[in-house]
Image (cartoon, rainbow, N blue to C red):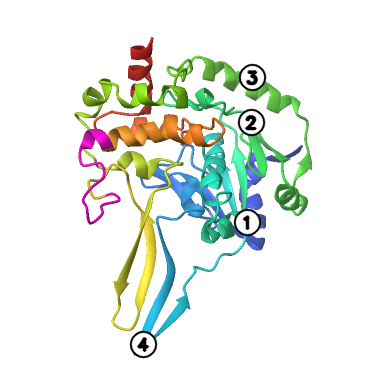
Amino acid sequence: MKKLALSRLPELFAAIGAKEKLYIPADDGESARFLPYREGMELTKKLNTVRSAKDLFFPQVENLMAFQVTGKEIKIIEERDPCENFVLFGVRACDAASFGILDRVFRYAEPADTYYVNRREHGTVVALACTEPEETCFCGVFGIDATQPGGDVSAWIAESDMYFRANTEKGETLLSGLALLEDGDEAPVDAVSAKTRAILEKLPHAKLSLKGFDGAHMLDLFHSKEWEKLSESCLGCGTCTFVCPTCQCYDIREFDTGKEVKRFRCWDSCMYSDFTKMSAGQPRPTQLERFRQRFMHKLVYFPDNNDGVYGCVGCGRCLQKCPIHMNIVKVVKALGEEKQ
């Protein structure tokens, strides 16, 4: 266990930034987001960024390749965005857990997504434990401990110090190269963690039950009459999917510059009416079907195909940002009550 006085965080950021690119959660107007560190920048006091840390590994838009056509010849041009080593500092436990979900889709499934894998291999994640969770948080429902944030390095704020513990080889390499860190005692970390757990146990959604959300109940859930009532006010705006740390839908598009054809991919949303639209039409033509697909995937399809791991980490962003206040918690409660 290593420690550093909070007053020396600028020195820490400068030391890391001198070796690798550094991203930290910082205020950007009224909200917070992960930004490249520059001198004078401070950690946000907000619990979470509006958009998740997913952007650093699965960006909203990225170039894939380009094509040049000369007569009957096609030349393929590599347009992969260059990736350098970087440190992602201050990720909360929910976002750190989301990387494991994305890994199952992009890293460990065959074939692996080399664009995503490249960024994961170059990135070192420093995860910061929560001390003041909000009422919209429910990560514990999915087995995530906000006081043990994971990542390559786990970090805690206790009194006037920040404590660090390496969890992986990349984490060890990062901490061993920071001479300003001192040896620390785990007692302050244990004390602040106990206080945080007491808060977590009292949160409104701490006792949310996922019983019955599994493959065995798939058809019962799919055909539930509750979907009509739940989806009737949904705008199909896609806000929930864009702030979600585990959504992974994307579209691949091309445009002709006049000199070459560029191929890129960008985030997409299962809530959109043209999502996966084909020549035969839209496979889910109604908002009810699209709404149901999103939550069935998070709560039933994904865990049924991934060793019981749910496609949600309880970060609470969709609770905060949905303009009509419809979210996964309300879905769980509605369908759970019906099964009982």
Amino acid tagged 1: Glu
* Residue marked by disc 4: 72
| Badge number at residue 194 | 3
Residue at image coords 48%, 15%? 207
Q: Tell which tag, 3 or 1, sits nearer the viewer.
A: 1
Position above or below: 36 against 91: below
Disc 3 versus disc 2: nearer the observer: 2
Who comes first in sequence, dot 3 or dot 1?
A: 1
Q: Earlier in the sequence, mark 1 or mark 4?
A: 4
Earlier along the polypeptide chain: callout 2 or callout 4?
4
> Would you say residue 333 is visible in this rendering?
yes
Return the residue nearer the eye: 177 or 322. Answer: 322
**Mark 2 = which residue?**
148
Q: Is residue 331 above or below residue 297?
A: above
Q: Dot 4: what SS?
A: loop
Which class describes the residues within 10 Å of circle 2: few (<14), some (14-19), or many (20+)? some
Q: Position of residue 271 (x, y in %)?
A: 28, 42
